[in-house]
Image (cartoon, grey):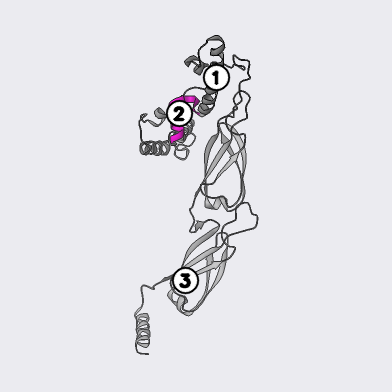
Amino acid sequence: MAFIDYYKTLGISKTATEKEIKAAYRKLARKYHPDLNPDNKEAEIKFKEINEANEVLSNPENRKKYDKYGKDWKHGEEFEKAQQQRRQQSQYTQHESGQGSFSGQDYSDFFESMFGGGGRTYSSHGHRTPKFKGQDYNAELHLDLKDVYTTQKQILTVNDKKIRLTIPAGVENGQQIKIKGNGGPGINGGPNGDLYIKFIINNSTSFKREGDNLYKDVDLDLYTAILGGEIIIDTFDSKVKLKISPETKNGTKAKLKGKGFPVYKKEGQFGDLIITYHIKTPTGLTEREKELFKELQKLRTHG
């Protein structure tokens, strides 16, 4: 595996702060985002590299391992364990034959043999080299709120591999799912890594979503609010007729049970739709209308 300098990828120094890392990532992500560079293979590769670099450097613990072990940072803990075992073995060997302990060359050989370099299968003591799980991949899938109102199937391309994915209705913004075995190849015959997909749900509708419930503001004319009546409003997938009670106040809420968003992985179950009425004051009144309002004002004041 070729070494990738994540600091160089983001165009920052090794002493960069978390704020500087975040700013550099956002700037480059906007520049190379696939939506702004359609059919641009180089931009797509660059975008993946930027995301990979950010995932490592924005995590303090991963950054610490990367600074210490370079491209083999994911296997730092395994190396530390192996180093401890070798020290224990060398102590025994030194007692028996006076030989030294784990050296810098051993460090290099360890990674070469264990993590994909030299291809050795057995150590000098005849022990089988441990198997390690491949690298996990992370991806984002951007969808609109309307897209996740119903269950749908999509074909994703990750590292030139097509993956058929069923997206259940009701998936949440920021929710992450794991697709087992679709990450990087295992090391020394170990299992493949996994693919983690994070859903980014954009909302271009007039509804606000909170969990399984939807919220919508509805304008109500003054006359209907005072006298009562019926109005027709849009729900997420249809229209319904609502009865308005006389003397409805501004800010009154109405709950439409079962007219909200689908409950994730619970077929046929829905949240509620909460309507908030906003009374609109009439404008552009005629002289006659003004006179009638004045008469009403007198009635309310002197009646």
Residue 61 colored in magenta in the image? yes
Name the front one of labels 1 and 3.
1
SS of the residue under disc 1:
helix
In this view of the protein, can residue 5 be seen by the observer?
Answer: no
The image quadrant of residue 123 is top right
Label 1 neighbour load within 10 Å: few <14, some 14-19, many 20+: some
Residue 252 — which label?
A: 3
Distance Cα–Cα, label 3 vs label 2: 56 Å
Q: Residue 136, percent across and down?
A: 55, 33
The image quadrant of residue 280 is bottom left
Label 3 neighbour load within 10 Å: few <14, some 14-19, many 20+: few
Q: Residue 3, percent across and down?
A: 47, 23
The quarter of the rendered structure image containing the C terminus is bottom left
Region rendered in magenta:
60-73
- Please name whichever residue, 38 or 57, is drawn nearer the observer in this view of the structure: 57
Name the residue beneath numbered marker 1: 86
Residue 184 colored in magenta in the image? no
Q: Specify which label sits upstream in the sequence, 1 or 3.
A: 1
Name the residue beneath numbered marker 2: 66
